Amino acid sequence: MKVGFIGLGNMGAPMAANLAKAGHDVAGFDTMAAMPDGVTKAASAAEAARGADVVITMLPNGAILRAVAAEVIPAMRKGAVLCDCSTVDVDSARAVADLAQAAGLGALDAPVSGGTGGATAGTLTFMVGGSDDAFATVAPLFDVMGQKAVHCGAAGAGQSAKICNNMILGVTMIATCEAFALADKLGLDRQKMFDVVSTSSGYSWTMNAYCPAPGVGPKSPADNGYKPGFAADLMLKDLRLSQQAASSADADTPMGALAAQLYETFVEQEDGRGRDFSAMLPRFEKRHRG
Ligand code: NAD
């Protein structure tokens, strides 16, 4: 397929490189980043999009996505699909889908989980919103870049699934970290805590697969000085998106709101910026009640 790829940062570069390696004809554009192997450099986003069957965007936020979409949509050929893989707010995802559809294009919101490791290995999970036809067009590309693509529903459903998942993840990580810090103060050995919880009703992905305590459980960023992994800054971004969506949908999410507040304090006032989101454990370790 002829693919335009816009936004070749930490995630976009390896995703585009995998498409090129699989034999697709990929034209890339980024305002800063270099082109990965096999990707032809376009002079602008519109040029990357011209004549493409699918245009993929992998950008920092909804405002940038809206600006890029306004530029590329008029350049795309009728019937082509605009597929945004960034994590953005649900309202921006729906607005861009409306613009694309009005111009006779297909549109998908297809945020990912799996991080830079998954992007490089081609093992991402895609959560996808949009029409059946657009999903069918892009499915072969999802197969190259990922191991799984779930078609979640209409426009915005992919972003909705992503922020709900990550709200659970943020809340659960905080619960796991505060429980370890409490266990420490009660004199409970961390390995014993893991042995019990990982096989009891408190088990979770954050405990069992991504344990925030160094030297306990499978290897995780805690064993690497809390180098990300999944950065606390990105968790804060996703929690803010969940709260923005909860406000616009009038949903009551008290735990999500508290998690957003704790990650905001951690990233903006403490030492959380640039650290893995599991570094909440050393944060709680240092703290006292009240
Ligand atoms: P990044 O900052 O490394 O990459 C974004 C790229 O977009 C940069 O290279 C930047 O130069 C480029 N860009 C910005 N404005 C542009 C414009 N107008 N035109 C063209 N290019 C432009 O970010 P990333 O880590 O690759 O993340 C991309 C998206 O994926 C984000 O929405 C993020 O939330 C999401 N995401 C990231 C991860 C992760 O682990 N890094 C995991 C899941 C989802």
Image: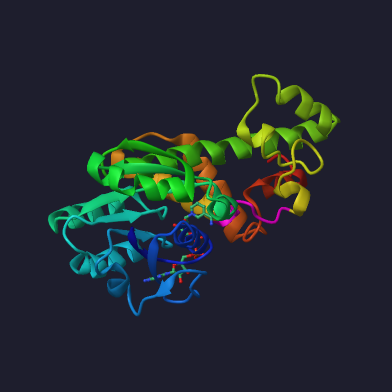
- Is 250 above or below relative to 118? above
Residue drawn where x is 51% and y is 69% of the image: 36
Can residue 264 be seen in the rendering of this structure?
Answer: no
Relative to residue 259, is residue 228 drawn left or right? right
Q: Which residue lies furthest to the top in this view?
A: 200
**Count of marks overlaid on the render:** 0
Can residue 19 be seen in the rendering of this structure?
Answer: yes
Location of residue 283 in the rendering, given as x and y in whole percent from the top left corner: 71, 48
The chosen color scheme is: rainbow
- Is 276 above or below relative to 67? above
Residue drawn where x is 62% and y is 39% of the image: 174
Q: In which quarter of the image is the C terminus?
A: top right
Location of residue 210 in the rendering, given as x and y in whole percent from the top left corner: 67, 40
Residue drawn where x is 14% and y is 59% of the image: 103
Q: In which quarter of the image is the N terminus?
A: bottom left
Residue 181 sits in quarter: top right
139 part of magenta stretch: no
Magenta stretch: dominant secondary structure:
loop
Location of residue 126 in the rendering, given as x and y in whole percent from the top left corner: 43, 44
Q: Give the range drawn in magenta.
A: 226-233
Location of residue 97 in the rendering, given as x and y in whole percent from the top left corner: 23, 52
Relative to residue 155, is residue 125 drawn left or right? right
Q: Which of 38 and 63 is in front in this view?
A: 38
Residue drawn where x is 82% and y is 41% of the image: 215
Residue 69 sits in quarter: bottom left
